[in-house]
Structure formats: structure tokens, C-alpha cells
Image (tube, coloured by chain):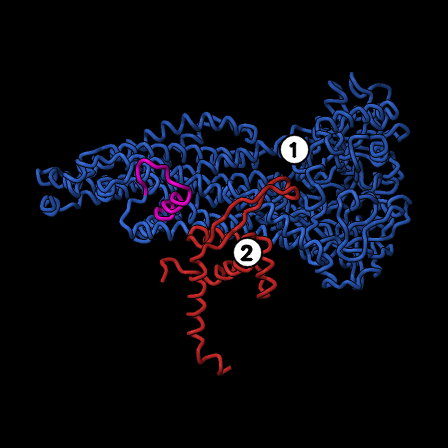
Amino acid sequence: MPRQSLGEFEQLVLLACVRLGPDAYSVPIIAEIESRTGRNASHAAVYVALKRLEKKGYVSSRLGDPIPERGGRSKRHYEVLPHSLEELRAARDALLNMWEGVETSR
Amino acid sequence: MSLAVRCVPRSRRDEVRDDLDEGLRARMDGNQPVRLWAWKQALLFLLRVPAASTADAWREARASRRHGRELLSPTSRPTLEQLMDIWLQDFRYAARGLLGSKSFTAVAVLTFGLGIGVNTAIFTVVNAFMFRPLPVEQPEQLVVIASQTELVEFPIGISYPNYLDYRERTDVLQGMIVYVPQPVSLRDEGPAERAWVEMVSGNYFDMLGVSAVHGRTFNEEEGRVQGGAPVMVLDFGYWQREYGGDPDVIGHTVQLNGYPFTIIGVAPEDFPGTEFMIAVDGYVSVMMIDQMGPDLAGLLEARASKIFRSMGRLQPGVTVAQAAASLNALADELEREYPQANRSVDLVVVPETMARPEVATASMLPAVAAIFMGLVALVLLIACANIANLLIARASTRQKEIAIRVALGAGRFRIIRQLISESTILGFLGGAVGVVLGIWASNYLASGAEDFPIDIPIRFNLAPDYRVFLFAFGMAIVTGLIAGGLPAWRASRTSLVDTLKEGGRAAKGRSGGQRLRNVLVVAQVAVSLVLLVAAGLFLRSLQNARSLDIGFRVENTLMVSVDPGLSGYEEERAQQLYQDLAERVQALPGVVEASISGFVPFGGRAVINVVRLEGRWATEESETLAAFLNVVGPDYFRTAGTPVLRGRGFTAQDSADAPGVALVNESMARTLWPGEEAIGKRFATSAEGPWIEVVGVTVDTKLIFIWEENRLVFYVPMAQRYSSPATLFVHTDVEPSSLAASVRAEVTALDPDIPVYDVNTMQTHLEDGTALGIVRVAALMVGSFGLVGLLLASIGLYGVISYSVNQRTHEIGVRLALGAASGNVLKMVVRQGMTLASVGLGVGILLALLVSRGLSNMLLDVSSTDLVTYSTVTVFLLGVALLASYLPARRATSVDPLTALRSL
């Protein structure tokens, strides 16, 4: 087990980053989570989660090029680091293992 | 939103703001409630980001502790998160410590609670008077406008014709309204009742920016045509009380003074009206003034009748001073155009929050508020000293613990901070108790005010708002720091080596703590002396006010008021009613005499008349003179106990057909006819008016304030100048209140439809009313501050002496073992306490002499250096101090020398 495990919401955010590719940033991440899970995600929650993920070393961030729509300022893009995928997979496997045999009884 | 984004570290703020903007833009395409979304996002930032960073910091700190690393390396500056963590640690530690000594905590919290409680209570009152804005649109733009005339020393209202001109010509106001409260007889189904309505100009609600919760407010037409607006807007409370909040009441017709009025709307619940203390039941257009009362007809045209209260809304960017200057220029203009009606009228313009309850109080209010806030601050100061004392005592028992912490590497600042955390927690708990106490006390005050025995329904809304809570919160922080600061600083100076070497008996060798505690006790005694002196001065004022010669009898007098004019009586019928009523009451057993009067002293209603003389000017400087008028029935002067000095009082012969007669009071006689006999002289009350002959001179009486200079007053017979309402004065030879029911019954017997109100003995009227009520409440309040202060100070003194006895147990044991008489030990300890108290008293007397000078404006015939007050208070305090030091002293004498020595 990793020293610092992934929370559920952190997993969602991380997966959204994976899906969105290297150009992920908060607005599309929220849209992705909302459209896929039907859950409302607030900017604050996503902000906090991304910051934690970065601190724990799951994602890296960089400032993109300045864009005119944002008054010449740039946005922060998040990229998933390779070993995160393994963590995600491990988390999914763990869940699936736990689900084994339970699902059929529904 | 930008506030919320501030929670984010600065380096990321721009990005986050831009992200939010982008999210917002994306939403705007859809149909969602965007504003709500934005607010929600902002709020979430406000809550989640700090919470998350605190939690992260906590987790990190725990992890780093687990790794055995130093939390703070001495060379690096701690990050914000680390600081937060240290604070949390300190607070948790302090909370554990306080939980460990529950009785200490309870005493400290209660002491703080008392101190903060009285402060909160007084602040709640000050807040209601001076800070809480009216719940209307942009209340900060509102100013109250009043006329300062030469008639009376305080500002009065403005006249309606002047109002129209001011409103028309001014360019500094966006809008201007007039309003005046008026009692009416209101009848729906069932009997008529006495109600209060506010007569308002048609633009009243529009100018204030208040709209009806049901129905509508007045329209333009209803403010323009005289007699053309028989409509009424109900007060929310009245609507709830009388109609159970039924919205169908719109369109319903009620009888106001017998005229049908249609209810068109209900004012909002939070709108208290523009009267600060009067609870009105509804609003009618001033255009219906002729229907509102028999003596009001024609007032809309009377330029000289300055009876309307007025409020204006400043143009943006215009200051109060600019508005005052500009409006006064207008007033001068109107004075030139109407020299008779507007002679030397100046306009007084003050912000609405400074004109509660009256413009007249505007100049006094801040000073009075400052005095009361100052006095309660002193109470809090004593409380702080008490807690500081307790904390010092506590710290000295914890010296060892502190020394160990220092030995383990805690810095001095850390120790101070940790101890202050403790007092801050105490401050907050005390603040919570204080808020509860304060709200309770202010409710008590409010209910007292609402029971004020006058005809007007009083509303005194002291509901606490955020300002009150903010104030209590601030007080809690400040007192926590003040009370904790000194002891913490001292405790942090603990000498490591000495303390650890001396083991548990550390404090003995060092007198520093005791010295500081002594200083605190001296300060407490001094401050409580100041408070008690203030209380004493107020009590002396009250005493003086009670014994003032007010010019009429206080005992054995009952007053009963009726207003037949409101029940549709014409003058002739009303006069007959007055006469019948006086005769019937006179015949009651226990009644010596009964007589009718148009005015009640200190009744809040007064009429001023201009007086001119036959053949010459009234005084050397002016053609006319303003004097107060009272209209009274036959035998009034005997009934009221106002002696007629020369000449005669009125009799039944002074009827409507008889020649006009008057009595004048001494001051008026002296002013108008200096050095001459007033009797036989003639004067008139209008340019055309008939001459009135003076037939007698009475003593001076007080009319409006008990401390006023004597005013000019003249009396004319009720038969010659009718007044409704009127008050029957009843002189009894039994307890006057016992006759209240039978006098009431006589009115009902004459006409069951006439409401009887203000049934009061003169004694109650004076004690609880405007005459003495204010002085009495002030004395009561300051007195209770004084007592709370005294209680706290005596606890402080007791604590210090008692602590010192504990510390000296060993020494006392030795003395006793060596043969000291227990009386000597007693004397020694008591002397210690009394020395402290005497120093405190000395300092206190000096302080009180300084402070009480500020009170002198509020005192009545008492010098601020009143010897009686000072000596009484000093002796009283000495007695209390003696008791507070005697109790521990007695304990000292019962020290068993053997036990004391063995514990060495």
C-alpha cells in the first residue's frame, strides 16, 4: 500500500485528468465529473483535491501559455504522472475484488 | 467572490479566479440560476480551502512528530500552517488545563460573564439609539429636520406650508417627508378603542423605499387632495394582532373618529415606522388631518404651527453640514417671505441615527452614551483585574510545570502565548455567558420602558443584532488579552534554575507575584470607588429631584384622562361632560375636590402661545413673548395644590360668556410686568384676539423636565378655551389609587363610549414617568454597576489576602509557636488588607474627582465633589474591605503551629 492512499473524490479527479489528457484543468475536470457521474463538483473541492494530488505526487502541474480570453493570463494544466495509473488500477482492483460475488446478488 | 478567493494562497489566486470566471461563463449559456451558483462556489471556497489546509497541516505535523523531528527548526520561519498547528496545540492544551480545574474556570467565566454582560447590555441600548439603521432603503442618507425657534430651548417640528416650500425649493434633498403621531378612536366591529396612527405625507413610503407586504401604500393623489384619501396602511403588528394576519383585510373599511377609512395595505414586519419609541397601529395620509382630531383642523395651512416631524433624504455626495447650510438659507428666504410665522426660525439637520428619540437629544446622546459605556468599561476592568489575580495565583502554582517546559526548549514567547490562550478561552466562554446575561438585562430594560405610564404605546426594540454580537466578541478577545497578558508575561520570566532547585515551594522567596497582585487589588478598589461615587451622585440627584418644589401636590392626587373630541363630541357637549364628570367625582366618598385640566405636567404635551400686551411691547427687545398655556376648570388650583399667591383662582362664574380672565405664574408676572402688580393687567394671545385680564398670580411649576428653569405659564378657564383631551385631577383624602375604579365608573356612567386612559396617581406619574423615571433608571443602572464592581473588588481583595495567608501559613505557624497572640496575627493580616484598601481608596478618590467632573451635566443640584457621597462611599468600602480581609485573617489565627511546622 502506498504511504498516502487516494480518497474517493481524489480518484474521480485523477481519472478525469487521465481522460482529459495532458491539457486538463479545473473547468473541464468539473464538467467531466459532472457529466459522467451526475454528481455536482464545486470548484473549491476540485481545487483542494488537485492541490493534494500534486502534493502527494500523483499529478504535476504547469502553467500554460497565456491566452487572451483570460486577460493574458495562463491557466494551470495538470498532467497525470505514470505511477498514478498503477495506483488507480490497484484501487480499482481492490474494489472489484471486494465486489466479487456481491454484484450478482443484486 | 473575491473575498472567498483570498483563502487561496496568493500565488494561485489569479488562476482560481479565472477558472471560476470560466465556469461562470459556461453556466451562463444554460438556464441555471447563475448568481446562486456563483455564491455557492464562493462560499464553498471560503469554507473548504482553509479547512483543508488546516487538516493537511495537522496531518503533516502529526506525521513529522512521528518521525521525531523538531516541529520548528530554530532557523526557519514557521509557515502559516505550522503556526496554525501551534495555536491549535496551545488551545487544546489550555482547554485541557481549564477542564482540569473546573472551579477556577467557573469563577473566571462568571466574572468575565458579569463584566461582558453589563457591557453588552449597555451597548445593546446604545446600539438601538445610535447605530442600528432604520430598515429602509439606504438609511444612511436620512436626516431629521427640525426648527429651532426662540419659543423653546429645544428644536421643534416644521409647519406644513414650510415643508412644501422646503421640499419644492431644496436641491440638497432627494426627497422629504413629514409625519406626526396622533391618537384616534378606531372602530371596526365592537367598541371603539384608542389607537395611534402616524399621519404621513403622501410620499412617506416612497421616499423611505418601503413597500407594502400586502396591498399598496399611498399613491400620489392621496397625498395631494385634502380630505380625499380616506385610506389607511396598517402596521404589521396591528394587522397580526387584530386581524390575525388575514390578507383579505385589504379593502375592508374601519371607522377612524367616526369617518370610514379603507385599509389599502400592510407595512412590512421589520418596518418600525419613523417614531423611535412609539408603536403606531397604522398610517394615514396627512391630507385627512381635519378628520383626525378636533384641534387639528386647518393645520395644513398654518405656517406658524410647527408640529410636523420631518425627514429628508440627502442627495448623493451631499454632507449633513452642507444640507444644513443650504436648508438654512432656504429658511432665511422663507423668514423674509413670512416674517410673522417664521420669525427667527433656524433649521436643525441631524442624521437620523442621532435623532432618537428626539432631535432635542441629539447633542446629549453621544455624551450620555460615552458616560454609560465608560462606567461599564470600569466594571469590566475590575473583572479583568480579578481574573488577572486568579491567573497569577494559578501561574505560581504552575511554576514548576512552566520551568520544565522551558527546560525542554519552549521559548518565552511560546509560554506567553500558551498562557494567553488560556485567558482567551476564558474570555470567549465569559463572552458567551455575557451575551446571554446582556440580552437578558436589556430585555429587562426594554420591558421596563414599555411599561412607562404614559398614554403613548411605547415600543423599545432592543433585539440584539450583529453589532451587539460583534461587540461582545471584541470584548471577549480584548478582555482575554488584558487579563491574561500581565500574568503570562510575568510567569514567562520564571527563573529555570531557581524554580527547579527550590522544588514545590518556589513562590515563597519571590515577592513579585504578590506585589503585582497587590497593585491589581489597589486598582480594583480604586475603580470600584469611582463607580460607587458615580452611583452615589446619581442617587443624590434622584433624592434632590424628589424634594424639588415642583409647584403642585404629589400625594393624594389621582389623574384620569378622557378625549371626548375623538368620540365625536362637539365643544358644547364636551364642556358639559367635563362639568358633570367633575361634579360626580367630587361627590364620591374619599374625594376632597376634583377639577379638569387640559395639560398634565410632565405629560409630554404642551402648548405654547404668543402673548402680546396692551399698549407696549412684551419686553424691551420684542413685541411678543412665548408662554405655555394651560386650560383648567374651576377650583383647579386647590385641587392640584398649586397655591394662588395673589388674586383669585377660577370659579364657575368665569364662563364662556364672561370676560376673558387668566392667571399667570410668578415668572411670567415678573417678566411681563417687572416691579408692577400683574393683577388687573391685560394681554392677548393673537393679534386680533380679545384682551384677557389677569386675575391672579400662582407659584411657578415644572412642566417638561424636572430640572428645567422656571418657565412662563398662564392659565385660562376651560370654559373660555376648550381642550380635548383633558385630564381630571382628583384630590383625595384616601389612597388615591383606591379610587381609580370608581372614577372610571363615573366616566362610563356618563358615556360608555368614551375611552378612559392614563389612570395614574401623581406619585406614579412622577416616579415612573418622564419626570423622575429617567433619573431613577440612571441611578438604578449606575448603582448596579457600582454593586457589581464592589462585589468583584471584594472578591479580589478576599482572594489576595486569602492567598497570602496560605503562602504565609508556615510563617504564621512559627509566630504562633513562638507565642504570638492570635489577636496579633489577626491584626497583622487585617492590616495587610486594610493597607491595600486604603491605598486603593486614596487613588480612587483622586480618580473619582477627575471622572465625576464629566458627570456634572447629568447631575441635579449635586456638586461632583459632594462630600456626603464621597464620605459615605469611602466608609462603606472600608467596611466591605474590612470584612473581606477579616475572613481570611480569622483562618490565619486557627493555623495549628504543629501542622504548619511539620509541613516544612
- Drawn side of residue B731 relative to residue A20, left or right: right
Query: Height in image: B612 above or below B34?
Result: above
- Drawn side of residue B841 relative to residue B533, left or right: left
Say which mark, if any, is on residue B362: 1
Query: Height in image: B228 above or below B702?
Result: below
Query: Height in image: B636 above or below B681?
Result: below
Q: Are marks 1 and 2 on the same chain?
A: no
- Drawn side of residue B177 relative to residue A54, left or right: right
| Secondary structure type for disc 1 | loop
List x then y, in percent, for residue B183. 76, 49
Disc 1 and disc 2: Cα gap in Å? 69 Å
Q: Tag 2, which chain?
A: A
Residue neighbourhood size for the residue with mark 1, other residues' Cα within 10 Å, grouped as few (<14), some (14–19), many (≥20): some
Residue depicted at x 56% and y 50%: B443
- Amino acid identity at mark 2: Gly
Residue at mark 2: A21
Query: What range is drawn magenta here?
Result: B72-90
Q: Tag 1, which chain?
A: B
- Report which colour depicts chain A: red
- Amino acid identity at mark 1: Ala
The chain displayed blue equals B
Say which mark, if any, is on residue B57: none
List x then y, in percent, for residue B830. 25, 36
Residue depicted at x 55% and y 31%: B859
Query: Height in image: B29 above or below B548?
Result: below
List x then y, in percent, for residue A4. 38, 58
> Is residue B697 at all visible to an observer of this figure?
no
| Secondary structure type for disc 2 | helix
